[in-house]
Image (tube, rainbow, N blue to C red):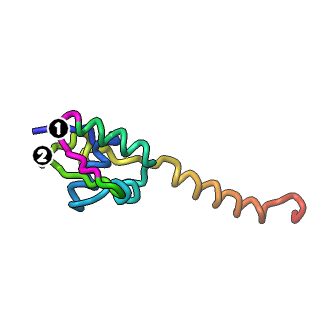
Amino acid sequence: MVQVNAKSAEAKVLRVLLERYPIDIDEVVRRAKMKRIDVERVLYGMEKKGWVQLERLPDRTFIRLRRFDFTFLGRDETQRKAVKHKGRDGKKRVKEKLLKDDDDDMMYA
């Protein structure tokens, strides 16, 4: 089983490859929203590791997965702590205070 960091460029490319197969480099670039040179660099590294095989044709380069046992490491949505928002009540109090002060102004005394 191959473990991949969930935030890495390899993980981005692998998710696209696992979703849609067969696929060429241009389609991976479009779906992963990465630069072509970055995708090619990642794919060549994965080819050296034996994860994918690049089939070069005269006009296109197709990608063939050689393995399907990838595990993405990183935090899941359920593992993240909830964000605590402080000061929401404080904004209401300030707004209420401003509304009260309008009637008690020196000019209207």
Q: Which span of residues is magenta-colored?
A: 48-56
Q: Nearer the viewer, mark 1 or mark 2?
A: 1
Percent of width and height locating residue 22: 22, 60
Determine the image quadrant of residue 92: bottom right
Marking on residue 50: 1
- Which residue appears at 64% of the width and 61% of the height? 96
Marking on residue 67: 2
Q: Amino acid at mark 1?
A: Gly
* Quarter of the image that includes the C terminus: bottom right
Q: Is residue 108 above or below residue 78?
A: below
Give the CA distance from mark 1 to mark 2.
8 Å
* In magenta segment, residue 104: no
| First in residue order: circle 1 vs circle 2 | 1
Left or right relative to 30: residue 1 = left
Percent of width and height locating residue 44: 30, 38
Please rate how many residues cluster around mark 2, counting C-alpha atoms within 10 Å: few if below 14, some from 14 to 19, many from 20.
Answer: few
